[in-house]
Structure formats: C-alpha cells, structure tokens
Image: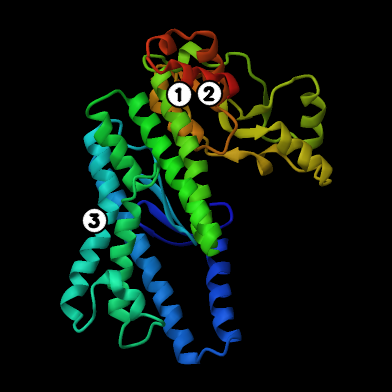
C-alpha cells in the first residue's frame, strides 16, 4: 500500500503502518525527551503507544471477522495517528448486517476492558481517569489500557458517519426508511458532529481532534456519494454502459513509442496487452510523467498497473462500484465469454446515469443524487 509499511498478514488481511504514524510517535517521544522526561517514563510511554494501537488493530479485526460472516473480505488495515482504517471489499448492503459489522469493533474494545477489569483495583471510574493518569508507569499501565479501551469504544460509537456509530445510526434508520434518506440523515449528522470536533479542536488547540473532524467530513462525503451512485445504478449491468471503443498497447512497447501512438487518441487510459491477454492498464498521465523523467526506453510493462481484475459484462453495476472506486487503475476491462468487449470506470457510470436518469426519478431524494452525478 502506498506510503505505508507492511507489518504482517493475518489470514488474508494485511496490516500496514502509515508513515505519518511513525512520525507522530517519534514526535511524542522527542517532546518528552526534550522536556527532560526520565528515560523510564519515555519507555513506558512507548510501550503504551504500542499497546494502544494493538487494541486499535484488534478493533479493526473485530470489524473484519464480523464482515467475514457475510462473505466480505477485509483486504488491509492501515494504522494512522487518528486510528485504524479497515479496507473492506464493501460494506453490507442490508441494515442488520451493517449494524453488526459496525458494532463489532467497539464491542472488541469493551471486551478488552472487561478482561482487564479483574486485574485492576483501587482506581476511580474511567471518567475520572484524568485525575490519576498524568503519565504511564508500571503501577497504572493496565488501568491506562482499561480507560483507553473504554474511551475507544465510546468515541467510535459517536453517531458521526462514516464512523462506527454513524454506520449504526444509518442501519437503524434504514430499518424504517429507504437507503438514500437514511444515508442523507446519517451523513448530515456526521457533518454537524465533525464541525463541532473542528471547533473544539481550535478552542483547546487539539490538532488530532481537528484532523478527525476533517477526516469525517471528507470520508463521509465520499461514502455518501457511492451510496447514491449504487441506488441510482440498481438493475443496470456492465454491458449496458461499458465503453466499447478503447485503445491498447502491447506490453513490450517502449514509452517513447507509446507516446507517439498516444497522440492519435484522446483516451485517459490504455489497456496493456500481452498477446491476447490483458496484462494491465496504463494511464496517459503515467506515460507523460515517464517521458518527463527521461524513461523513453522503458517498456509499458514496467510502468503499467498489473493484475487488474476483469469484470464480467453480465455483472450488476452495483456489485462492482466498490471494486472500481478502490482500484488504482483508471479503468477495468470488461469481458464476455472470455473475450474483451470494452472497459469501464466510474466516469462511465456517472455519465450513463446522468443521461439515462430513469432510476433517479424513481426516488424521492433524486435531486441530491442528480446533482452529485452532474458534478461527478
């Protein structure tokens, strides 16, 4: 995964450490060292950070295991300074499974706190922890982890979509109303809470709180749009909207040769062929960057995005939107009976739905979806 270090793999789920996490930890330890903190306290702080983010990984694995019950794989878990992100193939389409998968993470944290509780005595309730924990040491380490897990569970249950609590809210609403309306309410609630996080962060000078608020706004908007898109695309197959005219280059062609041929086309991406087989995808911008870097003699194969999935022309669009949105390639090949019949990307879907807006008109909240599709 780009900008991340792979730590290990559990079953089919890879655990990554984002570069910003390492910088964040180094900054904390540097500040402690610069302010004259004793080496023993710095060591306990480092151990606390490792323990906390182990709990974060277990939280995300809770989501992963719950999703696995519904046949949904989790490709990776990435650790960031603001927490962990589990990259699932998709979220459950039905409300009850979505509630269960979303609640699984916080429940893991509550379970960890419950397991730690018998080993802790003589400490106040977790909401008074600030009066006790000024620094982490041997005496309060388990209590610190207990408090952190309680706070992780409660924080993630805040109804700010797409956080766990926001997804639970969406699932509960969806039991009584359609997906579009439940998503709109959950997303709006999330934006309000995110704004409060940012304002609170500015008031108390808490950068992490502000970053969480910005993350909620950005990621919530992206997921809301994908849900609108799936709603509008119900019943459509890839063969209905795949682009049948596409350009391709042989994998052994040099960048210089490809650049000359590229001038004859306006495509933003090109299939890379190894004889009659699709070897990968290469974007126009990749070819141009290679030229500016003096890589005229390198082959297309060396710079293409390889191992791109091939999509069945009979597949429902709703089943592949997550795959398209999460794939690094600009487009994916569409095949019928083993033969390539075209390509498809997110823009194809958006343009088709904008022109053929039958599905949009069938929904009470089609105005929001239509504005999204028009702006892409």
- Disc 2 to disc 3, how far (Cα)? 35 Å
The residue to which callout 1 is attached is 229
Is residue 105 visible to us here? yes
- Find residue 276 and report its image quarter: top right
Question: Which quadrant would the C terminus be assigned to in this image?
Answer: top right
N-term mark: 2 or 3: 3
Q: Secondary structure at mark 3?
A: helix
Q: Does residue 245 lie above or below 68 as drawn?
A: above
The residue to which callout 2 is attached is 372
Mark nearer the viewer, 2 or 1: 2
Q: Residues within 10 Å of mark 2 (few under 14, many from 20)?
A: some
Position of residue 368 in the picture relative to residue 252 (left or right): left
Image color mode: rainbow
Taking the view exactly as shown, the residue that stands out farthest to the front is 203
Q: Does residue 356 lie above or below 128 as drawn?
A: above
Position of residue 18 in the picture relative to residue 172 (left or right): right
Q: In the image shown, does 308 or 37 lie closer to the viewer?
A: 37
- Disc 2 to disc 1, how far (Cα)? 9 Å
- Find residue 358 and report its image quarter: top left
N-term mark: 1 or 3: 3
Q: Position of residue 340 (x, y in %)?
A: 53, 19
Q: Residues within 10 Å of mark 1 (few under 14, many from 20)?
A: many
């Amino acid at each position: 995964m780009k900008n991340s270090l792979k730590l290990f793999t559990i079953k089919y789920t890879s655990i990554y450490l984002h570069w910003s996490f390492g910088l964040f930890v180094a900054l904390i330890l540097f500040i402690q060292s610069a302010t004259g903190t004793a080496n023993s306290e710095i060591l306990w702080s480092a151990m606390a950070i490792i323990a906390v983010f182990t709990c974060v990984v277990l939280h995300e694995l809770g989501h992963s295991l719950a999703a696995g019950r519904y046949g949904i794989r989790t490709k990776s878990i990435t650790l960031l300074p603001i927490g962990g992100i589990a990259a699932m193939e998709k979220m459950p389409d039905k409300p009850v499974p979505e509630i269960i998968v979303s609640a699984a993470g916080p429940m893991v944290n509550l379970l960890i706190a419950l397991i730690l509780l018998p080993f802790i005595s003589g400490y106040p309730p977790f909401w008074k922890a600030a009066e006790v924990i000024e620094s982490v040491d041997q005496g309060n380490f388990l209590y610190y982890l207990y408090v952190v897990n309680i706070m992780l569970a409660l924080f993630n249950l805040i109804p700010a979509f797409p956080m766990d609590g926001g997804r639970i809210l969406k699932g509960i609403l969806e039991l009584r109303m359609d997906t579009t309306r439940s998503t709109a309410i959950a997303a709006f609630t999330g934006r309000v809470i995110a704004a409060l996080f940012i304002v609170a962060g500015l008031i108390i000078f808490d950068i992490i709180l502000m970053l969480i608020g910005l993350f909620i706004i950005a990621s919530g908007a992206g997921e809301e749009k994908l849900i609108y898109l799936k709603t509008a695309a119900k019943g459509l197959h890839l063969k209905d909207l795949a682009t049948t005219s596409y350009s391709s280059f042989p994998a052994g062609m040099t960048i210089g040769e490809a650049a000359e041929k590229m001038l004859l086309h306006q495509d933003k991406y090109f299939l890379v062929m190894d004889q009659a087989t699709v070897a990968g995808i290469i974007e126009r911008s990749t070819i141009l960057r290679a030229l500016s870097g003096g890589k005229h003699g390198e082959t297309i194969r060396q710079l293409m995005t390889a191992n791109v999935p091939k999509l069945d022309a009979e597949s429902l669009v709703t089943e592949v939107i997550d795959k398209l949105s999460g794939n690094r390639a600009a487009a994916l090949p569409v095949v019928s009976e083993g033969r390539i019949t075209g390509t498809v990307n997110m823009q194809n879907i958006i343009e088709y739905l904008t022109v053929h807006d039958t599905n949009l008109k069938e929904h009470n909240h089609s105005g929001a979806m239509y504005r999204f599709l028009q702006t892409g």
